[in-house]
Amino acid sequence: MSTPDVLHALAAILATAAALLALVRIGRGPTQLDRIIANDVLTASGIVLLAVMIVVWVRADLAVALILLALTGFLGPVVLARFVRRDKPHEKKILTQEEARIQREMREEEAAKAEIDELLRAEEEAQ
């Protein structure tokens, strides 16, 4: 195996690994921005794989597909970024275990205070 063959194989393996990791990130998120970036990485991996195929198979006719993939790879994130809404701090998000515990404790404290206030009001009315 010559040096160019090794480099082509290495590029294909790394691009495939990047594509698989990008698919995982697309699935797991957690934010829309993560998914958009992972989509961009997936497109870049596809460009690399297509470029390696063009060089290894000596198929210049695939260059059109490479150009189309590069254009969609550029325009896709631009269009998606236009329509993605900004996350607001008060909106729902995925909480860490610590944040969920703190919120649960705060709700329990508020419920206990409300119950105490209710008992005090009932006691005042009874007198």
Image (cartoon, rainbow, N blue to C red):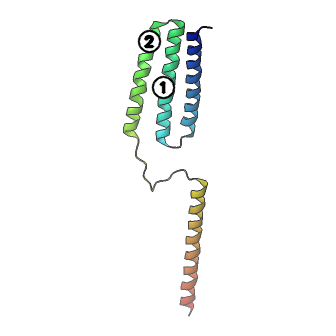
Q: Residue at x 43, y 48 (%)?
A: 87
* Residue closest to the far bottom: 127
Which quarter of the rendered picture does the N terminus lie within? top right
Count neighbours of disc 2 (C-alpha within 10 A) and say few if under 14, some if 14 to 19, many if 20 or more. Answer: few
Q: Given the image, on which type of amino acid does mark 1 rest? A: Thr
Return the x and y of residue 122 as percentages of the image width and height: 56, 85
* Residue closest to the far front: 3
Q: Earlier in the sequence, mark 2 or mark 1?
A: 1
Q: Secondary structure at mark 1?
A: helix
Alpha carbon separation for disc pair 2 and 1: 15 Å
Q: Residue at x 51, y 51 (%)?
A: 93
Q: Secondary structure at mark 2?
A: helix
Between 1 and 42, the one lying in front of the other is: 1
Q: Residue at x 54, y 9 (%)?
A: 56
* Residue closest to the far top: 58
Return the x and y of residue 28 as percentages of the image width and height: 57, 40
Count neighbours of disc 1 (C-alpha within 10 A) and say few if under 14, some if 14 to 19, many if 20 or more. Answer: many
* Residue closest to the far left: 82
Which quarter of the rendered picture does the C terminus lie within? bottom right
User: Where 114 sits versus 14, above or below?
Assistant: below
Q: Quadrant of residue 57?
A: top right
Residue placed under numbered mark 2 in the picture: 63
Residue placed under numbered mark 1 in the picture: 43
User: Where 69 sits versus 23, above or below?
Assistant: above
Question: So how many labels did they put on this image?
Answer: 2
Q: Given the image, on which type of amino acid does mark 2 rest? A: Ala
Return the x and y of residue 75 as percentages of the image width and height: 38, 28
